[in-house]
Amino acid sequence: MPPDLSHAAARLAQSKRLVVLTGAGVSAESGIPTFRGPGGLWRGLDPLRLATPQAFEANPRLVWEFYNWRREIVAQAAPNPAHLAIAALEDRVPAFTLVTQNVDRLHQRAGSRDVLELHGNLQIVRCSLCDRAHDPGWTPLPALPMCDHCGGLLRPGVVWFGESLPPDILQSALNATLEADLLLVVGTSAAVYPAAGLIDVTMGAGGTVIEVNTAPTAATQRISLSLLGPAAEILPQLLASAFPSKT
Ligand code: OAD
């Protein structure tokens, strides 16, 4: 086993307060495209430019086409070994918190409980007029879905650029990362705040931060250790090496 991996596994085995922070890369091996990097464009458009209230106001049909496409991909996807390893970690350490930027709910489908979803999720939709939340599951939605309560236009239940994160969820994530002795950052470019700032919260409080990613990120230089490789390979190895008798 590479020395970095065994060092990370030893650190993980000792952790009493573990936080895992995930991004789109953890679902890449489930076939869900990430936002940045190769394969990130949708019909030649940058998804990040569609993920704004302004884009929805200007062209709700186009924005819904994009989100209905993503909902379809997610509905057909399954959790991969990285999601499963993270779910298994929950029962291996005394205190565990999972914070995700992902909106695909694959962590929950892998068995993770109490997931802190910083950016909402694709399963829930909300009325852009009365704000009522609806749960249509993963069934296909009309091109322009309407609220059956007030007739307003429904919107995806995700957090768009320029919008606030759910304050209670952000606060819980801040508390957990402040108290963490180890933060495992998996498959995120660490480019979007406030999520990426959670790394600095743990670092600032003296905790260890270990990253798992296929490429260096905006955070690599300032964290404790970086493990380069696909999450679906590295996380099961980490789990097996840290907790050999329980896997
Ligand atoms: P990004 O698309 O910015 O980054 C994905 C990261 O995953 C990159 O650092 C890749 O190198 C890495 N990666 C790709 N495949 C991987 C694999 N198999 N194993 C491990 N790592 C892999 O996605 P996020 O960081 O999640 O927000 O993006 C953050 C936010 O920006 C998203 O939640 C979304 C987006 O705009 C909103 O929509 C509000």
Image: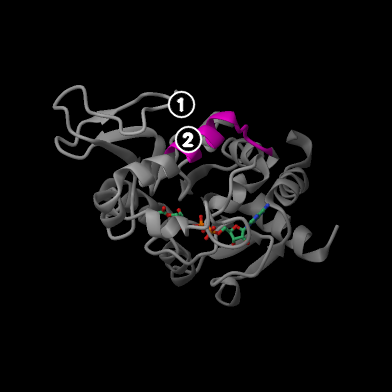
The front one of 3 and 48 is 48
How would you classify the magenta stretch by its main secondary structure? helix
Give the residue type at disc 1: Trp
Label 1 CA crowd tier, 10 Å (few <14, some 14–19, many 20+): some
Asked if 199 appears above or below 82 in the picture, the reply is: below
The front one of 121 and 145 is 145
Q: State the mark number for residue 138.
A: 1
Numbered-mark total:
2
Judging from the image, what secondary structure is the residue with disc 2 in? Answer: helix
Asked if 67 appears above or below 6 in the picture, the reply is: above
Q: Indicate the quadrant where residue 77 lies.
A: top right
Label 2 CA crowd tier, 10 Å (few <14, some 14–19, many 20+): many
Q: Indicate the quadrant where residue 39 lies.
A: bottom right
Q: Residue at x 34, y 25 (%)?
A: 135
Give the residue type at disc 2: Arg
Per the image, the residue denoted by label 2 is: 71
Answer with the quadrant where ligand 1 appears in the image.
bottom right
Q: Which residues are magenta?
A: 68-80
The front one of 200 and 105 is 105
